[in-house]
Image (cartoon, rainbow, N blue to C red):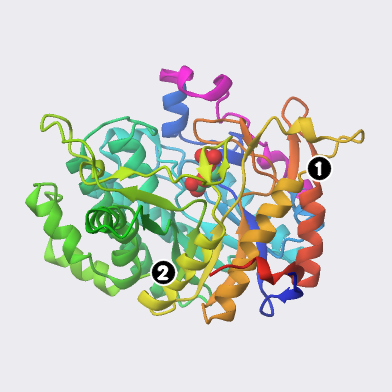
Amino acid sequence: MSTIKKLSFPENFWWGSAWSAEQAEGRGETGKAETVWERWYKEQPNRFYQRISSEITTDHIHRYKEDIQLMKQTGHNSFRVSISWARMFPQDGVGEVNPQAIAFYRDLFTEMNKNGIKVFANLYHFDMPAKLQDQGGWESRDVVEAYVHFAKTCFEEFGDLVFHWFTFNEPLGPILGSYLEDFHYPNLVDFKRGSQAAFFTILAHAKAIEVFKTYNLSSKIGVILNLSPTFPRSNNSADVKAAEIADLFYTRSFLDPMVKGNFPPKLVELLTEYDQLPLDFTQEDLATIQANTAQILGLNYYEPRRVKARLTAINPESPFLPEWFFENHVMPGRRMNEYRGWEIYEKGIYDLCMDIKNNYGNIEAFISENGMGVANEERFMDEDGQVIDEYRIEFIRDHLAYLWKAIDDGCNIKGYHLWTFIDCWSWINSYKNRYGLVSLDLPTQKRTIKKSGEFYKKLSDENGFNYDIDLLVL
Ligand code: BGP
């Protein structure tokens, strides 16, 4: 059977995409402090795919006018950038603000607005100034204060141009990467220090919101979280328990304090039992977190999390990690994006939105990242040099169909942002996996709209698309 229906999205739906300063701007000539990524590349270039650094990336700093035209041609009515802390404060993230950085961002945002593209501005996307990392990074209260000063400066300088603000992109990422799983500088494995850094990140979020509220801007401020619905392998109580614990570590840990203002009691209990709570926190910090929560929520959805009860015992001498309580489950029959190693499960977007509706007061939210990174896309180029990425179109349509269903079922979802607009640099994968609606020829910086870019324009113009709704299985 097949029932083709036009899936229409709410009026003024935000169609767009996202990227970040370190991944797209390039260093440029404005002056910029060294970031942890530049530092790490200098120390260990072998950790970066094909030894490509973030020095030039997509060279957006020189090409933003052309890029904004491409945004228009690919149907963007909104776009998320991040503002580089290191560029705004080139003396290692503190000190005097950089007039050239202000001029760059003001011009970029003005140009976006002139072209009908709403500015979603994120304040932190993994790009700590290296000298602040030396002072402890998110483990340091001084760094929290420096971040709040940076945030305040951005509200003052760009408040008239920004549509919505975000304190952090995926704050869990740097904790996993820097403190647990060795994929961010400074590559520690130390849960308790990670726990402190996580706590201060959450405090920084609350303090930035506290300051934001003093400005009476018409924009809102929120946070962008990477969330995966967690599924146990089976209904066996041991699998269910494993899934509950994984969910506490990876989903509720940031979602609850940043959106509801409090920490999940079960997580606190577990961390107390294993002596992994942060050492430095006060009642005043907790009150600040309680009083200053997100006004809008961005959901980055890439893949589900599947877990099962552990089969093997823990080596008590190994460092404490969330995996002490579960193992990842490789579900037989799962569909994979083999390039990135992530499962493709469209219905997860529906489950995630329903969780936010049912357990987080149906806060105003949007999909802030979703997308498909594919290697060697030149294989799919036609004779005119256009990438014919039918797989990406299918990926977007299938996810959007479930998003449409979530909205139909009452979720307060205001938009969909793809990762991403033009192929951009990725943290350690550099330019291996390409995500863009527009392809990038790295040596020449030539940009060419992919077939998915044309699809995205039509989707945005028509605010929907035709789909066989019999394919939706709830
Ligand atoms: C998200 C990050 C992005 C981006 C994306 C794709 O987690 O917020 O910065 O990189 O994932 O992932 P990757 O670049 O690792 O393939």
The answer to whether residue 415 shows anywhere in this view is no
Give the residue type that dot 1 points to: Ile
What residue did someone put label 1 on? 388
Residue 80 position, x and y percent, is: 59, 57
Q: Give the quadrant of residue 373.
A: top right
Total marks drawn?
2
Relative to residue 362, is residue 173 depicted above or below? Answer: above
What residue did someone put label 2 on? 212
Q: Residue at x 54, y 31 (%)?
A: 429
Relative to residue 121, is residue 186 depicted above or below? Answer: above
Question: As drawn, is 58 to the left or to the right of 151?
Answer: right
Q: Are marks 2 and 1 in contact (CB under 8 Å)?
A: no
Q: Residue at x 25, y 38 (%)?
A: 136
> Which label lies toward us, 2 or 1?
1
Give the residue type that dot 2 points to: Phe
Q: Could you tell me which secondary element the residue under label 1 belongs to? A: loop
Residue 139 position, x and y percent, is: 24, 44
Q: Which residues are magenta?
A: 42-66
Q: Could you tell me which secondary element the residue under label 2 belongs to? A: helix
The answer to whether residue 208 shows anywhere in this view is yes
Q: Nearer the viewer, residue 435 or 286?
A: 435
Q: Is residue 78 magenta?
A: no
Q: CA distance from mark 2 to mark 1?
A: 44 Å
Q: Dot 2: few (<14), some (14–19), or many (≥20) neighbours within 10 Å?
A: many
Main secondary-structure element of the magenta-colored stretch: helix
Relative to residue 392, is residue 16 depicted above or below? Answer: below
Residue 106 position, x and y percent, is: 63, 56
